[in-house]
Amino acid sequence: MKRIKNVLILLLLGIVVAGCGLKNRRAEKIDNQYPEWGQTTVQAVAARKVAKGMTEQMVTVALGKPDFVNQEGGEEKWAYGINVEGDIGAVIRKQVFWVYFRGEKVVRTEGNWNKLGYTFYEW
């Protein structure tokens, strides 16, 4: 039993280390493509985080293209969602995270970023 426990611990540790390596590789690629962004922004974008003041391009690199865009007052609202199972097994898109822009800069976000489910890093 103890041997199985040790194997599971090593397996989980390996998954964490591999994930960190992929994140670092994603950060390197972003930094090479956008060296003017600076390390703080590159690290945030690589971790798929959105912060106030980011540009539309930074958000697109971080999260991908939004599901839809609309205007609300003087702001542009980008919506990001997840697929969920609806009635009779139908898959529907549920919006869980929104990014608001004024001009071309993020002014705020709403929703639960964690629900987007970025459990791996890709490029």
Image (cartoon, helix red, strand yellow):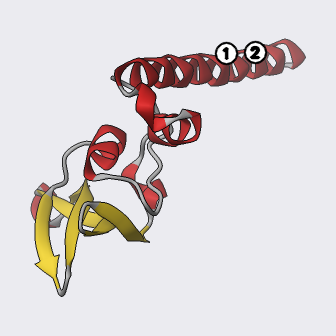
Q: Which residue is mark 2?
A: 10
In the image, residue 43 lies at what x, y percent?
Answer: 55, 36
Horizontal arrangement in the rendering, residue 88 relative to residue 39 (left or right): left
Horizontal arrangement in the rendering, residue 111 relative to residue 90 (left or right): right
Horizontal arrangement in the rendering, residue 121 relative to residue 61 (left or right): right
In the image, residue 114 lies at what x, y percent?
Answer: 48, 55
In the image, residue 67 lies at what x, y percent?
Answer: 15, 56
Q: Is residue 97 visible?
A: no
Q: Secondary structure at mark 2?
A: helix
Label 2 environment density (alpha carbons within 10 Å; few <14, some 14–19, many ≥20): few
Asked if the residue at tag 2 contacts the one at tag 1, i.e. Cβ–Cβ closer than 8 Å, the answer is: yes
Residue at figure coordinates x 50%, y 42% from the top left: 41
In the image, residue 100 sits, relative to residue 16, either above or below, namely below
In the image, residue 75 sits, relative to residue 22, either above or below, namely below
In the image, residue 65 lies at what x, y percent?
Answer: 19, 46
Q: CA distance from mark 1 to mark 2?
A: 6 Å
Label 1 environment density (alpha carbons within 10 Å; few <14, some 14–19, many ≥20): few
In this view of the protein, which residue sits in the foreground, 25 or 1? 25
In the image, residue 6 sits, relative to residue 82, either above or below, namely above
What label sits on residue 28 in the rendered view?
Answer: none
Residue at figure coordinates x 31%, y 67% from the top left: 98
Q: Amino acid at mark 1?
A: Gly
Residue at figure coordinates x 22%, y 63% from the top left: 78
Task: Tell me which corner region of the image, top left, top right, bottom left or bottom right, holds residue 85.
Answer: bottom left
Q: Which residue is mark 1?
A: 14
Q: Is residue 25 visible?
A: yes
Q: Amino acid at mark 2?
A: Leu
